[in-house]
Image (cartoon, rainbow, N blue to C red):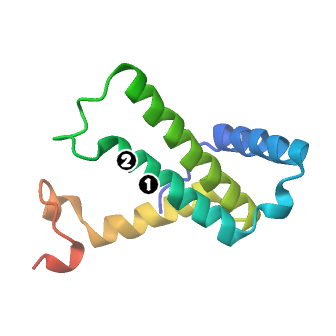
Amino acid sequence: MSTPPDTANLHALRTLIRQFVDERDWAQFHTPKNLAMAMGIEAAEVMEHFQWLPTGNELTGDKRQAVGHELADVLVYLVRLADVLDIDLPAAVAEKMQLNREKYPADKVRGDARKYDEYD
């Protein structure tokens, strides 16, 4: 299993988000269900910027900045949901990447985007 990534920046984000929430007394609204729904809604707002574009690489300037703000919203809700559920995100990522390595061995899947159960 690989070593979890450095957690300092993620812990700083979690602290920043906790402080923001605490200053507004919003923790009462931050149930796992509400946070998961909010994260999904924000992810849809990210997708909205790409709707009908050929690839999405066309985004520049203000539109690119708007996508950045929507991605920040997704990250805030993700970090907050993990915090509320007491999930160690770096450890979860490291574990998931190991599972993905086993499902998608690089020498077998390189350059091929099929799902793991579609390989011989």
Asked if the residues shown at circle 1 and circle 2 are in contact, with their CB atoms under 8 angstroms apart, the answer is yes
Secondary element at tag 1: helix
Residue at left 51%, top 41%? Answer: 70
The residue most toward the top is: 61
Residue at left 60%, top 42%? Answer: 6
Q: Of 38 and 9, which appears nearest the observer?
A: 38
Within the image, what quadrant is residue 7 found in?
A: top right
Return the x and y of residue 119 as percentages of the image width and height. 13, 76
In the displayed structure, 61 sits above or below 95; it is: above
Q: Is residue 113 left or right of residue 31?
A: left
- Residue type at mark 2 is Glu
Q: Quadrant of the C terminus?
A: bottom left
In the displayed structure, 51 sits above or below 110; it is: above
Residue at left 22%, top 45%? Answer: 52
Residue at left 55%, top 49%? Answer: 74
Secondary element at tag 2: helix
- Residue at the spot of label 1: 44
Neighbourhood count class around disc 1 (C-alpha, 10 Å): few under 14, some 14–19, many 20 upward: few
Return the x and y of residue 63 as percentages of the image width and height. 39, 28
Q: Of 24 and 117, which appears nearest the observer?
A: 24
- Residue at the spot of label 2: 48
